[in-house]
Amino acid sequence: MNENFEDLLKEEEINELKKGKVLEGVLLNKSSDGIWVALDATGDVFVKREELLKNISEYKIGEKITVKVIKTNDAEGFNTASEKRAQAEKLMDEIEEGSLVNVKFESRAKNGYIVLIENAIKAFLPGSLSMLRPEDEMPKDSQRMKVIQKRGRKVVVSKRDAVEESIKEVYENYKENMIVEGIVESIKDFGAFVKLNEHVTALIPRSEVSWDKNTRINKQLSEGEKVRGVIINLDKNAKKISMSLKQLKEDPWEDVEKKYPIGSVQKGNITKLFPFGFTVKLENAVEGLVHESEIFWGRKGKIADIASEGDRVEVKVLDIDKGRNRISLSYKQALGNPWEEAEEKYLEGNIVNGIVEKILANGAIIKLEEGLTGFLHVSELSWNFVDNVEDVLKEGEKIKVKILNLDKENQKIKLSLKQAKENPWKLISEKVQKGDILTGKITRFVDKGAVVLINDYEVEAFMPGSKATENRTDDIKEVLEVGSPITGKVLDIEFQSDQQRGNLVLSVLDYIKEKEKEEGLKIMEEMNSEEE
């Protein structure tokens, strides 16, 4: 019985409400300027807003709170306590020189700053250890600092020592080949900087971002992104760390010979055009080169005419240099040699479609399909006379041509533009004879006359200079010009075969004389009729 009484006395003494005691209670009520806390067996205490560790809105009714009694039955008639001072008591026992603590700036002081540790203990931060300039504003966020001195309740902290501790920790604990995580801080042309902690930054060189050497860093990474990489170089003396992202992934070139056997045909996308060829991406980080010699089967053309960046193409693997990460590819061999089936596809006498690829002085190169071209001689351009090939054809123009001859062994094809349509001389020879009157216009002048394109027949006639006008002149260009309309009499017309050009001679002078003769006869007939 006595023992129970003694226990009760001890318990009452423990829970007795005295100034300076640290007690635990439960949040009973909140007001705008503080909170009420109910203590075990001792009554209630009021904790003012400035003595709280948090904003009043963050507290919940019923939660447990530890406070230190400040006054009992004060002038206002109630007991007051402090959560901050209770926290300070606890922290003061826990912290020691060398401890790392969270600190917030409170005010400036002589030669430094007054700061709050965990929002509870006031400490001094010397300006020389703050890593701040005198003109800098005090940081508003929480800062990690190191306790460098503790004498009773006086505490001195250092920002610089905390930073050095943080850096030292990284360089002591991190090793080469270790996998680490960080946040991308900034991206440059030469690489990306990654924060491993608040004070240590590592560099990912551009070459270590991806196995694809053509990749752009800003396409692979973005600021603020969390990344994992392996440390490839750690220099403790220079305080530099390099890391790699690609080395956490399989090197696509490791088994490239198995995936792309020599002689196999593969699909890929054209990534870049060069004067000497183009590159094809087979997969990420694996590209090959198609040299210009492996693009065209026949005559070399313009690479841009058959390839564009982004095009999906088939290519044949010719060679692999794994040590240098190089693959040689062939575009033309994947397509197949068009000359192998040329005799079956382009029979002599057939009329086919073609594109004018290049104009020459004596004709033109006509593209029939990729890798297959033929030659169109100037004599096969038109059933009329042609002085300049460019007057008839334009590069890139689509035309129909007739196959005259195909020599597979020497890879040559002779073509005809004029024979792809009916010979107009045949038609005019059937409908026109000597003495007929025709119209046309002058297309050009020659040494002894002019060439006239006959209307409706697409043939050219020759008009001698002596037959061009009724007034004799030494130079018909003085009285006529290209495009002048002409009406004349056919003096001669010749046509021998469908494969040859005909010949037609036209005379303006004979037409005028015949017309004058007809008019004279008409006048005579009218006079005779009047006399009767």
Image: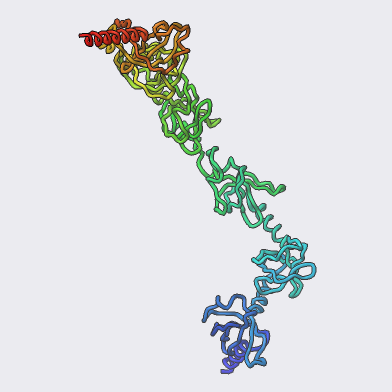
Q: Position of residue 209 (x, y in %)?
A: 56, 43
Say left or right for 518 vs 109: left
Quadrant including the C terminus:
top left
- Number of callouts in the render? 0
Q: Position of residue 507 (x, y in %)?
A: 36, 8
The vertical placement of 26 against 511, above or below, is below
Quadrant including the N terminus:
bottom right
Residue pushed farthest right?
Answer: 111
Residue 195 visible in the picture:
yes
Residue 214 vs residue 128, the one in the foreground: 214
Q: Position of residue 38 (x, y in %)?
A: 56, 86
The vertical placement of 494 against 131, above or below, is above
The vertical placement of 14 against 142, above or below, is below
Q: Position of residue 6 (x, y in %)?
A: 60, 92
| Residue at (43% x, 18% y) in the render | 391
Residue 231 visible in the picture:
no
Picture quadrant where residue 508 is located: top left
Say left or right for 190 vs 359: right
Residue pushed farthest front?
Answer: 531
Picture quadrant where residue 313 is located: top left
Residue 280 vs residue 3, the one in the foreground: 280
| Residue at (67% x, 58% y) in the render | 166
